Image: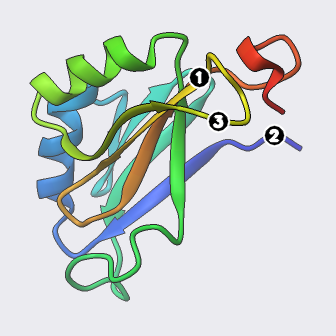
Amino acid sequence: MNFNSILIGSEDPERLVDYYTKLLGAPTMSDSGYTGWQIGSGFVTVGPHSEVHGKNAAPGRLIWNIETPDVKGDFERLKAAGAIVVREPYEFEEAPGSSIATLADPDDNYFQLVSPMGPDAPGGAQ
């Protein structure tokens, strides 16, 4: 198996498309009301969903991650582009040298910038 993508449903997908375009650049795909950006080997896609209304009532329930060797640098770049900051970069206590930062979109869905994980990553994070 291979994890491929995540779909973020929204009552107002155009607002999210505008937001993620500011952060991630021009979308990689747009078709039938769904817009997506390829990040590494996966996609994050935004689209309408009939069962989604308003903001996310539990933003920490599902958090998607973007792995980067430069959490602080990419955090500053996204922040300058208008990212909604939930938590500035900090270091994992359990994995010295590994960083994480939490951001949100206008629907209050959380996503994070995280240091690379695995046995060869700083701190050997699994």
Q: Nearer the viewer, residue 115 or 43?
A: 115
Mark 3 highlights which residue? 93
How far across and down, in percent of the image, does residue 26 sit? 23, 24
Q: On the picture, is 91 further left or further right than 10?
A: right
The answer to whether any part of residue 26 appears in the image is no
Q: Is residue 2 above or below residue 119?
A: below
How far across and down, in percent of the image, does residue 124 sit? 82, 20
Q: On the picture, is 92 further left or further right than 80?
A: right
Q: Nearer the viewer, mark 3 or mark 1?
A: 3
CA distance for labels 1 and 2: 21 Å
Mark 1 highlights which residue? 115
Secondary structure found at label 2: loop
Mark linked to residue 106: none
Q: Nearer the viewer, residue 100 or 3?
A: 100
Secondary structure found at label 1: loop
Identity, as a three-letter code, of the amino acid under mark 2 = Asn
Q: On the picture, is 66 further left or further right than 31?
A: right
Q: Nearer the viewer, mark 1 or mark 2?
A: 1
Going from the N terminus, do you reach mark 3 or mark 2 first?
A: 2
Q: Is residue 92 above or below residue 85?
A: above
Secondary structure found at label 3: loop
Q: Residue at x 17, y 29 (%)?
A: 79
Q: Residue at x 32, y 56 (%)?
A: 32
Q: Nearer the viewer, mark 3 or mark 2?
A: 3
How far across and down, in percent of the image, does residue 52 sit? 33, 83
Mark linked to residue 2: 2
CA distance for labels 3 and 1: 13 Å
Q: Identify the image quadrant of the N terminus.
A: top right
Q: Identify the image quadrant of the C terminus.
A: top right
Q: Residue at x 24, y 53 (%)?
A: 105
Going from the N terminus, do you reach mark 3 or mark 1 first?
A: 3
